[in-house]
Amino acid sequence: MQSSLVVLVMSLLVFIGVNIVGNPVDMLINPEADQEEIDRVISDLGLDRPVHEQYGYFVFNALKGDLGKSFIYGEPALKLIVQHIPATLELAVAALLMAIVFGIPLGVYAGLKPDSKTAKTIMATSILGFSLPTFWVGIMMIMVFAVQLGVLPSTGRGDTVDVLGVPMSFLTLDGLSHLFLPALNLSLFKISLVIRLSRAGTREIVHMDYIKFARAKGLRQGRIVMVHLMKNIMIPVVTVLGLEFGGLVAFSTVTETVFAWPGMGKLIIDSIHNLDRPVVVAYLMIVVLLFVTINLVVDVLYSVLDPRVRLQDQKS
């Protein structure tokens, strides 16, 4: 119920916010068109109705799965986004996996041995992930790995394989080579974030009584870390990664633009430039639904990782 209310309020804010900016008619008709032609286009697009009436019409159609028709392409906005979303999701998932694979082990190591030179190097390097702008890092990656070394491609998605009608590039070597650089570029900030979260959690938990008791029992360090420490530090990490995954999907526009990745980034940039309101509104609503769904999944994972949450739910 709370999620439904959030989606409804956001739909109102998004629709009104997009519809008070600019006039798409100016982008769609010839500047030399007469007033009769202008009035016809405005009527065909439904822009002659009051904003509240347009919003009611939008909500009514959205409940049926219709988020409007693109002014520019003349196709359903949802269809255009669905055509581009697999590439964006693939890029976001690859970036998230990189953040997990690199961030958690490095953060745990830095937390277990905070005074070592390696740990200090890891924490110092993680600052770069927060500091360096994504577009500049992407350009530098292209200069080094694609132009100078020539070991990785710089643009495009490469060869794809259709899985249930959805093109996937990570299933081919050429696709993986095209995916690596943009995914790494998109994941740098997330890797730094996960390193710091993992280190902070490790430094807090490593001094807990149950960790000391496990060591007193003679358990191996590897078992202590994997069984007793990892499960507890994963709670804040899962929370942040869940929300950050939505951010990876929603804000991968810069990376997609730098690497010419054929995802939703280029589509939304073109739609904003051309004032293609239905596509912009549909994109933002899908992002809202994505964040709401991720929050729900994170709440469920809470109860899996922390039994205390399940006990509290049963008491309530």
Image (cartoon, grey):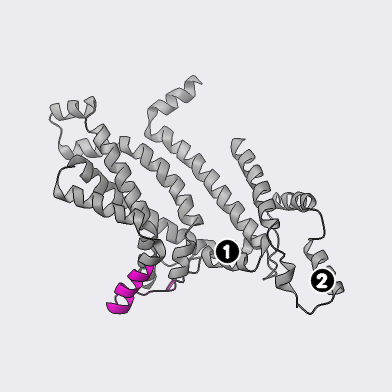
Vertical position of residue 106 compared to residue 186: above or below:
above
Residue 214 in the magenta stretch? The answer is no
Q: Is residue 62 left or right of residue 38?
A: left
Boundaries of the magenta span? 138-162
Q: Is residue 217 above or below residue 253?
A: above
Residue 125 horizontal/vertical position (percent): 26, 54
**Considering the image in quadrants, where does the N terminus appear?**
top right
Q: Residues within 10 Å of mark 2 (few under 14, many from 20)?
A: some
> Considering the numbered disc 1 on the image, is that residue within a helix, a strand or a loop?
helix
Q: Residue furthest top?
A: 315
**Alpha-carbon span between mark 1 and mark 2:** 26 Å
Residue type pointed to by label 2: Ile
Front residue of 22 and 72: 22
Q: Viewer-proximal residue, 246 or 134?
A: 134
The residue at the point 66 percent across, 65 percent down is: 275
Closer to the chain start, of discs 1 and 2, is: 2
The reply to whether discs 1 and 2 touch (Cβ–Cβ < 8 Å) is no
Which residue is pictured at 66% across the width and 48% down the height? 13
Left or right, residue 195 beside residue 32: left
The mark closer to the camera, 1 or 2, is 2
Question: Which residue is rendered at x = 51% and y = 21% of the image?
Answer: 316
Q: Work out which residue is located at the far right of the displayed protein and give it.
A: 36
In the figure, residue 235 lies in which quadrant? Answer: top left
**Image coords of residue 80 (percent x, y):** 61, 65
Check if residue 144 falls in the magenta segment. yes
Q: Is residue 32 left or right of residue 149?
A: right
**Where does residue 142 sit, x and y in percent of width and height?**
35, 73
- Using the rendered image of the protein, determine whether residue 135 is visible from the camera's viewpoint: yes
Residue 268 marker? 1
- What residue did someone put label 2 on? 38
Q: Secondary structure at mark 2?
A: helix
